Structures are given as structure tokens and as C-alpha cells.
Image (cartoon, coloured by chain):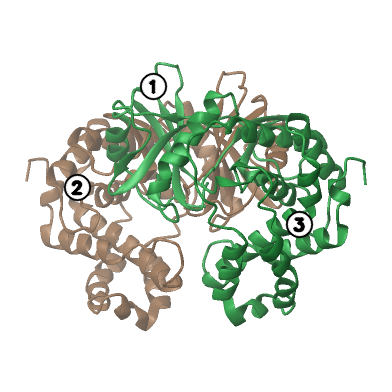
Chain colours: A brown, B green
Amino acid sequence: MAVYTHLGAEDLEALIAQYDVGQLVSAKGIAEGVSNSNWLIETTGSPSAETRFILTMYERRIDLDDLPFFLGLLDHLSARASPVPRTIHDRSGSASRMVDGKAVALIEFLPGVSIDNPTAAQAEAVGQALAGIHLASADFAGTRPNSLRPADWEDLFGSCGDKLAEIDPQLPAIISRALPPMLASWPDHLPHSIIHADLFPDNVLMLGKQVTGLIDFYFACSDITAYDLAVTHAAWCFDKGGRQFRPRIGQALIAGYEAVRPLSNQERAAMPLLAQGAAMRFIATRAFDWIDTPHDALVERKDPMDFARRLDFYAQAGPAPFTEAAP
Amino acid sequence: MAVYTHLGAEDLEALIAQYDVGQLVSAKGIAEGVSNSNWLIETTGSPSAETRFILTMYERRIDLDDLPFFLGLLDHLSARASPVPRTIHDRSGSASRMVDGKAVALIEFLPGVSIDNPTAAQAEAVGQALAGIHLASADFAGTRPNSLRPADWEDLFGSCGDKLAEIDPQLPAIISRALPPMLASWPDHLPHSIIHADLFPDNVLMLGKQVTGLIDFYFACSDITAYDLAVTHAAWCFDKGGRQFRPRIGQALIAGYEAVRPLSNQERAAMPLLAQGAAMRFIATRAFDWIDTPHDALVERKDPMDFARRLDFYAQAGPAPFTEAAP
């Protein structure tokens, strides 16, 4: 959460002049995104009367070859009335430009704020919105493999080596017990689609009960559709530390999802494994980042054990959290 | 430049409800300020039709006892048509509130962007705006001593000790040579007023040649008026590394200043010493922060030598940069 690159007024004015959005009025670097820099830009106005935009500069982790997929997906979903920001194309029609060797995109500003503690009604709306993008992306031509699948989690744990036990003495055993069934029985036979793959509350903008924006699609990829619901379930239905499951939130999330895209029996049966996999995916990246980040660095290290607790919950609970009746 | 505290939608909505500004529509943490967290807030609107505000949370370095001075000064200057953001008072009339033990203030949003490379016309406008706040603060009742005066610089260097030479082998000698005359002959007989004391380009918002905002008054204090012009001169009239003085910018800054508040002969005669002092003040705080900040921390360390070069320039140049004729 930082602005990694300094762009002065002169740089920003020159860039904004490449778009049909009027003159630059204000630019504030905003603390969003871990792999890019973002500015909230205000201009004198575009032909469609918009005056605010998000300018994103792609700094790290993102393969520039993936940018047409990410930006094309935003335009595709936005055109189908999903609450997703569209990209603003420059005067030559391009969705991205290069500034000092880095790619930038000008993106629609959407209202709304991120929720810390969702109500059931808010979780239901999030489920509906998630199912909405699964359906709306069906005719999207782009594809992108998921670079964070079970074999990739295994690789990440392998590169952590002996240091996993320094995070928590129990962590190696937790992984050794839970990972093999995921590697052996990952349900790739289930329907695939474009998935968001990282729909945490800070990637959802809401006004009251309404979802006004799904943002930060930079993990989006082609993968098992129901896995996206599992990721969202793990991200929304617990307290922050993963100690307390919130059954009413989980139920509302799934009910909202199924109101738009009902799960098949096969998908429902796979949810316990998919949810354990979702927890494992975040254990893997958090453990890797935990070891990779100096203790005194001024970036927040996210505790892998928050998701080890979720993994444990899903392993114990079995199908109960994913059945239609209230637990 | 960071957001140090997480405030979720629920926290923000509860806070905004304490002000007569409508409902929360958007909140983005912005990367401004080194001693506080800031959010750009959008609401459905205030009685005066404003919809955007800056929410500041005071985190570090700021003594809460100083807050009435800082916030009162903003209101005082804003009421006198200086381009300074006013504070929004809450329903009880208070300019600040407490959230989780930290003070917060809701502040007017001003348009404009910060300039990297000012033109002469822009420097002239900055000089005018600076003189404007010096005159407009004359009847401000608040006072605050400057905690960064020559004896304080000496203390900061003292706490750096032998490590000064690790920054640059020449730095101890530069300080030993230049600091004693400042301690012995600091021109405290000159007129005092409220000064900004930190008017770098990133604390000035501009649209074209117009100054639309002077911001970040958290070093403001009561001190020698002409010292503020010296700080601003050191901050605006060189390239970033302090290697190249830009005489036309310096001349325009002073001309703009004097168009609003002419310098007395005594003030003009003191400018070379005040400018060396301004450079020394930033050497002192940057050297202290340089030594205090881990090498691998993800915060930008500002090089003290950028201002050692400015100090050297001012010592060599004598009165020339501050005379009315073009150099």
C-alpha cells in the first residue's frame, strides 16, 4: 500500500493530455494496491462528464503481457453492467500507455467504501456480484492461467524451507497433512470461467447494501468457478484473525451467489476441499512474503496463521457451511 | 508518506456523521504527510455544497496541545482569503475530534497539483502567497515557538555524533564552519510573524500560474518573517540535488514576495545568513533522520548533502541572490 513512483504535475499533465478528459485539476497518490502505484485524478471533465479517474502505474509482479487481459476484462465486464471500472482509452484508442518505461492505465473512478464487518445483506450482495462476473465473463475472449494453483503453493512452501517452522512450529505439519489431498484430488473437472481470485473486502466498494465496485483484478485468471466463491467465503466470513467463523455471513454470501448462479451438486460437494485450498493459497503467499520481508520493514506483514485457522475450520466443518439450511 | 491507521467504512461513516456534510460516498487513503494519515473523503454534500474533504489523523511528531494553533491558523488565514484550507467544524463546533485515542480533523479539499520544476511565473506567485500569509497572520492570536532554531540544530547534530562523517566525510567540517556564526549572530532583532517554515513545492498546490493551496502547516510557528522566505528560497530555487541554483526562479520568488511585503534593508542584509540557516535546518533534520532510519526500510531517506550544497552556494554567493537586479 504505497506510491512507488513520483509523478510531478508536469508528468501528470503531459500524460492526461493524451486522453480526452479535460485539464488536470488535482492528483493525489492513494494508498491502494500492493503491486502498483495509484493516483486519484481530477480533471475539468471528459465528454461523458466524468471528472474523476484512477491512474494506475504497474510497478511489480505484473507481467506486462497480461495487461491486455486485465484491462480488456474490465471493459468487457463494465460493458455488461457489472460493477467494475472500465478503462479510459487514450486518443489513439489504447487502454494503456508507457511512462518512463512503466505501463499506466486511466481507469473509471467508482464510488463506495470498503467494509470491515459485513452484514448479511452486504455479504448477499457480494455473492450476487461475484456470480454476476462469472456469468458476464463467459463470452470474454481473453484467457490467463492461474499462477497460484496447488502445485504452485507446494513450490512456495518448498522455497520457504525450514523457515516455515519459525512462523509457527505447527505450520509444517498443517501443510503436510492438508496439501497432498489438494494436489491429488483438485476438482479440475468442475466448470471453469474467469475468476477474480482475490475478492477480499478491500477489493469491494459498497454504499450501504449495494456493491458499487469490484476492483483490483490483477489476480484474475481462468480457473474453477466455484474456487472463486471459496476464496470469497474464506475472505469474508471470518473475523480478521480467522478465529471465528460467522455462519450467517457465509450463508448469505452463498445464497446471494446462488440467486444469480446456482451451484451444481458437484460444485457444492467440492466446496469443503475448495475452501481448504483457498485457505492454503493464502497461507502459501503469506508465508513466502513473511519470510521474504525484513522484520523492521515498514510494510505490514500478514500473518499466515490467520488462514491456517480458516483451513482448520474448513477441515473440521465438512459440508455444513455450504449447505443451504442455516447451520 | 503513508496511511498509518486503518479506518474501515464503519469507522469513517460514524465519524462523518458527526459533521454536517452529508453521507459518506468514498474514502481513499492518500500518500501525503509524514506525521499523519490522510484520506480524501467524498460525501453527498455539505450545506455549502462541498462534497470533498481531507480527513487528517494526527499520528506522530505532533503535540496535541499544538492542534488548536495549527487548526485555528488554517481558519484564520482562510477567512482572510489566503489560499489555505479551512477546517470543517463538527456539529458541536469543534475543529478536531478524537478517534481511538487519536485526534482527527476534517479539512477543506483544495484543487491543484504540486510542481516539480517551477517557472518564474509560478515562483513569483508562490512569493506573493507566502507574503500574503505573513501579512494575514498579523492579527492571529495564537503563538507557537519554533522547535527547530539554531540551538536545536546543534542539538540534533550532537545526537548524530560520529555518524555524521558516515553520511559524508566532509559533513562535520561543513557544520563546524557554518554553525557558529548562526548561533552567535542569528538575527532575532528582525520582524517576527507566523511562518510556514516548510514551504517546499509539495506543500503548494497550483493550477497553471495560480497558487490554489498552501498546505501542511504542521511546522508553522512564530519566528523571523524573512527566515520563511529564506526557507522557501532554498526549497524552490535549486535542482533537487542542490547542485544548480536557478537565478531566475530566485529572483521571481523574491519579486513576488516584495510585491506584497517589501523587505526592509535590514531583512535584505540578513538574507545570506538566513538562507544558510535554512539550509542548515534541513541538513540537521535530514542527518538525524538518515541515521535514525534503517538502510533497508521502505521509506525514502532524504540526503542531507542536498542541503549542504545549498549551504555552500549561499556562503559563496553572499548578497547577490537577494539583490533586486538580475544576477
Q: Is residue A45 left or right of residue A169?
A: right
Q: Which residue is mark 3?
A: B273
Residues marked 3 and 1, same chain: yes
| Residue visible at 33% across and 61% down in the picture | A282
Q: Is residue B241 left or right of residue A149?
A: right
Q: Residues within 10 Å of mark 1 (few under 14, many from 20)?
A: some
- Quadrant assignment, res A178: bottom left
Name the front one of labels 3 and 1.
3
Q: Which residue is mark 2?
A: A268
- Quadrant assignment, res A115: top left
Q: Nearer the viewer, residue B234 or A239?
A: B234
- Quadrant assignment, res A16: top right
Residue A281 image position (x, y, % from top left)? 34, 61
Of label 3 and label 1, which has the lower sequence position?
A: 1
Task: Tell me which amino acid carries mark 3.
Answer: Leu
Q: Is residue A42 visible?
A: yes
Task: Tell me which amino acid carries mark 1.
Answer: Thr
Q: Which residue is mark 1?
A: B44
- Kindly state the secondary structure of the residue where label 2 is placed: helix
User: To which chain does the residue with label 2 belong?
Assistant: A
